[in-house]
Image (cartoon, rainbow, N blue to C red):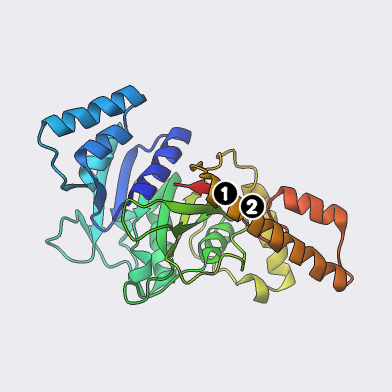
Amino acid sequence: MILPTIARMLLQEHAHRPIKGRVLCLGPQQVALNKGEVDAMFAKTPQAAAEALDAWRKSGSDEAVVSDAYFFSKFPKVRLDSLDVVEGYGGTVIHDLNTPIPKRLEGKFDFILDGGTFDHLVQLGTAFQNVIRMLRPGGRVFHYNAASGYIGAAYVSFGPDLFYDYYVVNKFADCRIHLLRGTGAGTHDPFDMFFLPDARTKQLNSARNQMVACLAEKAEDSTYDAVPVEYTYRPPHLREAFAAQRGLMLRSKRPMLKGARPALPALREAVRRARCEWAYAVDRYRAGKFNWEKFRSSRARHNAGTGYIYLGQI
């Protein structure tokens, strides 16, 4: 399901670079918004948004959620497909992502939306390969999947670094990782949004509902069959190759996503981050490994001690 939070993230990416061409949803998606809300979301001005909501009310205030087809019809020049494992539920492409895609699907799509499909799969390596193979060079994939708090609703919960490492070692042009933490049980409740520049931090572990949101952009020379090794167990030669590719990725000009910053959550996160960095600095000092210049430069890149930056609520 495309939650309002995810819809707003997609619109921010569209503002950076238009979403157009062939779009594939992994599974037909409902959108947790009614027609008036979608029309208002895509309005160009606040006045136009108010007029869209007023028109929706005058037409009967239908509260029914809209389909992915209606949502993506708001993006100019989009041809929408959806992939499903069985026929009869609206899928235009029938395939099990646990098995390799047929050659006819290679390089067919400009944008792929994984609306919580990967966390229901078993053969994740095959699924990653399928997505990369289906993307055209320059194409983008947006994943959002369970990170914590979804026991009984998903096969697996993801560490953010799995997505990041997979796309780095397969030479993607860019990969942005965010962690979304729910602020309430309703679909319209906003999520606290955290940007993870290297996708690694232990400071955001939580029993609350959290989702990984990954946006990755394929390059001309991207591969699909390289397999990452988790950081802790990565041998030196793989660390060097990883760092070199990540250095290229850091040249991306994709802007940071933006969220609202209510005073109390923003203050809470600032205090928590300061406490984390202080604890990190003390631990490094006691171990005789603290370097102020390195700490200062790392902190500027949002890496020191915490490995994340709070972007607000979206």
Label 1 belongs to which residue? 266
Q: Is residue 54 visible?
A: yes
Residue 305 occupies quadrant: bottom right
Q: CA distance from mark 2 to mark 1?
A: 6 Å
- Using the image as rendered, state which of residue 122 and residue 150 is in the foreground: 150
242 on left or right of 186: right
Residues packed near mark 2 inside 10 Å, few (<14), some (14 to 19) or many (20 plus): some
Q: Amino acid at mark 2?
A: Ala
Q: Residue at x 36, y 75 (%)?
A: 155
Q: Is residue 173 visible?
A: no
- Using the image as rendered, state which of residue 241 and residue 247 is in the foreground: 247
In this rendering, the answer to whether 256 lies above or below 88 is above
Q: Are marks 2 and 1 in contact (CB under 8 Å)?
A: yes
**Res 218 label:** none
9 on left or right of 163: left
Could you say where residue 16 lies in the image, as x and y percent from the top left? Answer: 48, 35
- Using the image as rendered, state which of residue 176 and residue 249 is in the foreground: 176
Could you say where residue 45 lies in the image, as x and y percent from the top left? Answer: 36, 24
Q: Amino acid at mark 1?
A: Ala
Q: Residue at x 72, y 68 (%)?
A: 237
- Count of labels shown? 2
- Using the image as rendered, state which of residue 220 and residue 160 is in the foreground: 160
Residue 187 occupies quadrant: bottom left
Residues packed near mark 1 inside 10 Å, few (<14), some (14 to 19) or many (20 plus): some
Label 2 belongs to which residue? 270
Q: Residue at x 13, y 42 (%)?
A: 62
Could you say where residue 23 lies in the image, as x and y percent from the top left? Answer: 31, 45
**On-image quarter of the N terminus:** bottom left
Local secondary structure at mark 2: helix
Local secondary structure at mark 1: helix
Could you say where residue 259 lies in the image, as x and y percent from the top left? Answer: 49, 43
35 on left or right of 261: left
